[in-house]
């Protein structure tokens, strides 16, 4: 467990990622493909939380920029995750601005949060984040909590790296992630006890409310 009780999952394959990035910067296209395969799943999950079904298009735009500016990057595998997440976030916000849709904070239904549930630990909430339904629930969290959870759990960034992506203090991001995971665990538990859930409609973009 990390500070404040927040679970920490070390990003996998960062040594391999760092080596691949270094080779890609020397012009090795195969190495760039390796870096893409390592980073893309988490990046796409993050973007699904930001822009919903447009995630793949935004990811494509982000990777064009990543490939173009790869020579400017300096850092290791973990740093590359943070750098690519920052680029993807900028492209996602540009996309939302073009659609004239601005992410808005919205809270989960308080009555659902108060229901007793079987899933009441952060670790159980983390395990459930592999499903599309869980991503839908994350999108319903207040925006600061949703982005913190996505960056920490889905992208695999540590607290300071996630803070740099969001332009916030590490403590604020750590607190937001902790609160978001707590809300998510409670809500998953409420669903397990027959709760109605946030919504039965299609997925929303991050922080979007009705």
Image: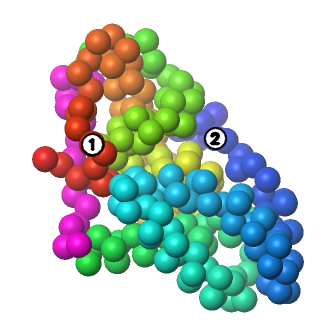
Relative height, residue 167 to residue 10 (above, below) = below
Task: Quote the CA–CA distance across marks 2 and 1.
Answer: 30 Å
Q: The N terminus lies in which quarter of the figure?
A: top right
Range of the magenta residues? Answer: 99-113
Magenta region includes residue 134: no
Tell me the element at label 1: loop
- Residue 27 % position (x, y): 83, 86
- Residue 20 % position (x, y): 83, 69
Residue 89 seen in this snapshot: no
Q: Are dots 2 and 1 in contact, CB under 8 Å?
A: no
Relative height, residue 129 to residue 174 (above, below) = above
Q: Is 99 on the left-hand or right-hand side of 73?
A: left
- Residue shown at 23%/21% (left/top)? 196
Q: Answer with the quarter of the image where residue 114 lies.
A: top left
- Residue shown at 69%/66% (left/top)? 36
Tell me the element at label 2: loop
Dot 2 corresponds to which residue?
Answer: 8
- Residue shown at 56%/45% (left/top)? 153
Q: Answer with the quarter of the image where residue 3 lies.
A: top right
Mark 2 or 1, nearer chain start? 2
Dot 1 corresponds to which residue?
Answer: 202
Residue 154 seen in this snapshot: yes
Viewer-nearest residue: 97 or 58: 58
Viewer-nearest residue: 209 or 186: 209
Magenta region includes residue 106: yes
Task: Report the mark closest to the observer, 2 or 1.
Answer: 1
């Amino acid at each position: 467990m990390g500070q404040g009780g927040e679970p920490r999952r070390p990003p996998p394959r960062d040594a391999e990622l760092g080596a691949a990035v270094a080779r890609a910067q020397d012009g090795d296209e195969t190495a760039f493909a390796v870096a893409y395969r390592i980073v893309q799943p988490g990046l796409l999950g993050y973007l699904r939380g930001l822009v919903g079904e447009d995630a793949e298009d935004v990811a494509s735009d982000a990777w064009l920029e990543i490939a173009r500016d790869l020579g400017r990057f300096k850092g290791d595998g973990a740093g590359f995750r943070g750098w690519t997440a920052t680029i993807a976030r900028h492209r996602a916000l540009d996309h939302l601005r073009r659609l004239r849709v601005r992410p808005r904070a919205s809270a989960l239904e308080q009555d659902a949060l108060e229901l007793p549930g079987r899933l009441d630990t952060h670790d159980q909430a983390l395990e459930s984040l592999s499903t599309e339904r869980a991503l839908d629930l994350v999108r319903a969290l207040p925006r600061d909590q949703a982005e913190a959870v996505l960056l920490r759990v889905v992208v695999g960034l540590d607290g300071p790296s996630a803070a740099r992506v969001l332009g916030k203090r590490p403590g604020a991001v750590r607190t937001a992630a902790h609160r978001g995971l707590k809300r998510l665990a409670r809500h998953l538990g409420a669903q397990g006890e027959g709760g109605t859930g946030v919504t039965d409609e299609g997925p929303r973009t991050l922080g979007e409310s009705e």
